[in-house]
Image (cartoon, rainbow, N blue to C red):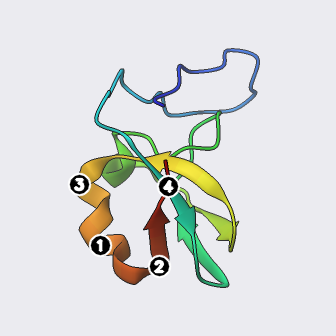
């Protein structure tokens, strides 16, 4: 589920590492703010990302395992 950097994007993007441990989740609250890469997933380097964007309820994306505890009950794991 990890994504490669899309070089067609303008501006700075954060490449998700080839992290096979990425966890597919669905946002289950009205909204949260997360750093996203060019593919719409949270990059493995999420702690260093300077910007976040609003992610709406129902959005499905992949996140690194180390952010799951912080997200708590704001996400549900999906297959």
Circle 4 SS class: loop
Q: Position of residue 50 (x, y in %)?
A: 47, 54
- Residue at 67%, 15% in the rendered image: 7
Whether residue 11 is situated above or below residue 33 in the rendered picture? above
Q: Position of residue 34 (x, y in %)?
A: 52, 62
- Residue at 43%, 49% in the rendered image: 49
Bin the neighbour count of mark 3 within 10 Å (Cα to Cα): few under 14, some 14-19, many 20 and up: few
Which residue in the structure is indicated by mark 2?
74
Q: In the rendering, which numbered label is found on residue 78?
A: 4
Q: Position of residue 55 (x, y in %)?
A: 66, 66
Q: CA distance from mark 3 to mark 4?
A: 17 Å
Whether residue 77 is situated above or below residue 24 in the rendered picture? below
Mark 1 or mark 4: whose residue is earlier in sequence: 1
Q: In the rendering, which numbered label is found on residue 48?
A: none
Q: Nearer the viewer, residue 5 or 49?
A: 5
Q: CA distance from mark 1 to mark 2?
A: 9 Å
Q: Nearer the viewer, mark 3 or mark 4?
A: 4
Circle 1 SS class: helix
The answer to whether residue 59 is left or right of residue 79 is: right
């Amino acid at each position: 589920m990890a994504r490669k950097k899309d070089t067609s994007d303008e501006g700075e993007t954060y490449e998700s590492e080839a992290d096979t441990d990425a966890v597919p989740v669905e946002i289950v609250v009205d909204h949260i703010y997360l750093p996203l890469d060019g593919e719409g997933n949270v990059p493995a380097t999420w702690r260093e990302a300077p910007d976040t964007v609003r992610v709406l309820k129902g959005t499905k994306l992949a996140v690194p395992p180390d952010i799951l505890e912080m997200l708590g009950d704001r996400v549900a794991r999906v297959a």
